[in-house]
Amino acid sequence: MKSLSSSMLVVLLVYASQLRADEFQDWDRNKDGKLSLEEVPQGLQKNFDRVDANHDGFISREEKPNRKAGPQNTALPDTVKAILDIPYADTTNKAQRLDLYFPAKPANEKPLPVIVFIHGGAWLSGNKNSGRANIQSFVSSGRYAAASVEYRFSREARWPAQIEDCKAAIRWIKGHAKEHHLDPEKIAVWGTSAGGHLVAMLGVSGGVKELEGTLGKHLDQNSRVACVADYFGPTDLLSIGDFPSQIAHNDAKSPESLLIGGPAQENKDKARSASPVHFVSRDDVPTFLAHGTDDKLVPFQQSVEFEAALKKSAVPVYLQTITGGGHGGFEGPELNKRLEMFFDKYLRGVESTIPTGTLKVRE
């Protein structure tokens, strides 16, 4: 890539659609046709939210800058109702909000199971709007309610603030389950990248007091969930730097280091406290993993190690290996079908044998 001044790079990032093909491709390290936060030069990451106009955690060449502060809500289909910007932690912090979605016509009169989506963005970026596209079809079916959760970023608060926020959100949902006709014992969590890490942690830390926090009015509720869907999330901050990656994970400026307040290898206790694999036990919940073998940001081996740890503890786990898949962007009909089967089995009691194994990109 030709040398460009910092100011010119900012302009190019803000107008992603005006990047030359070679410039965009240089940054697009996993060659999936879009830029994640980790692929953007660190000096420009503060502009990411401006450019990510649809708040899906990625920048495409077609996106134009979003100059307005805060998430932008789009119209919902007639099949979905919503309550937006609920302060789950009983604070005025805009980061501690969730959106709650309901089917306009529930499939039956039973309390609805809930799918909670937690967005990615290296614990540095993104917002709860990015979850809408993922959970909308489940809600439209009439069989599920859903929520999308926002949390504090590492530049505002260090670990374990992020998991404390997520746990407070789960407790809020349980505390208001009767009011909204929800089933508090049937809550799934689903996340991508950093969100995948957070949902994995929710799945293995239901009884870990030091990660529970004291946020919100519903401390009488527990934060246990029924099942987890972790898409390409980090699972071991101590080993993530051992495998090829385009991020120097052990560097002091890596997303993981910013999360815990220093390099993992120099802060091993903190790194363990933020690593789901180190909390695995026999009472953990069923887990669905999806990860691309060519992920250049979060190595595929992270999910392989997590699967092995869960299997060793006899926890039901379903690893979906996406051959040639990068850091997301590999979803397809068959993977979506398997995820739906997983939720149906562990939230609605629909017996099935969930396939595992290798899929092709967008299969």
Image (cartoon, rainbow, N blue to C red):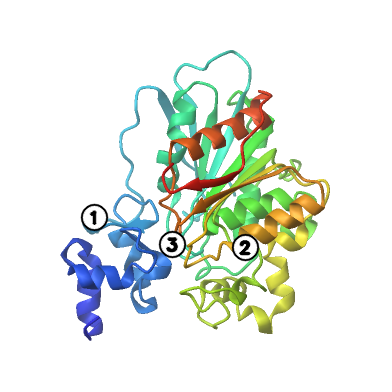
- Residue 321: x and y in percent read 56, 51
Disc 2 residue type (three-letter):
Gln
Pointer 1 or 2: first along the chain: 1
* Label 2 vs label 3, nearer the camera: 2
Position of 243 with respect to 30 (left or right) is right
Tell me if mark 1 has few (under 14), some (14-19) or many (20+) residues whose alpha carbon lies within 10 angstroms of its own.
some
Q: Is disc 2 surrounded by few (<14), some (14 to 19) or many (20+) residues within 10 Å?
A: many
Which callout, 1 or 3, points to the residue nearer the camera?
1
Q: Which residue is mark 3?
A: 125
Task: Compare residues 42 and 353 and report the one nearer the observer.
Answer: 353
What is the CA distance from the residue labelled 1 to the residue labelled 2?
Answer: 31 Å
- Toward which corner of the image does residue 18 lie, by quadrant? bottom left
Q: Which residue is mark 2?
A: 302
How many numbered marks are there? 3
Q: Nearer the viewer, residue 211 or 291?
A: 291
Task: Label 1: state its secondary structure.
Answer: loop
Q: Which residue is mark 1?
A: 63
**Residue 215 in view (yes/no):** no
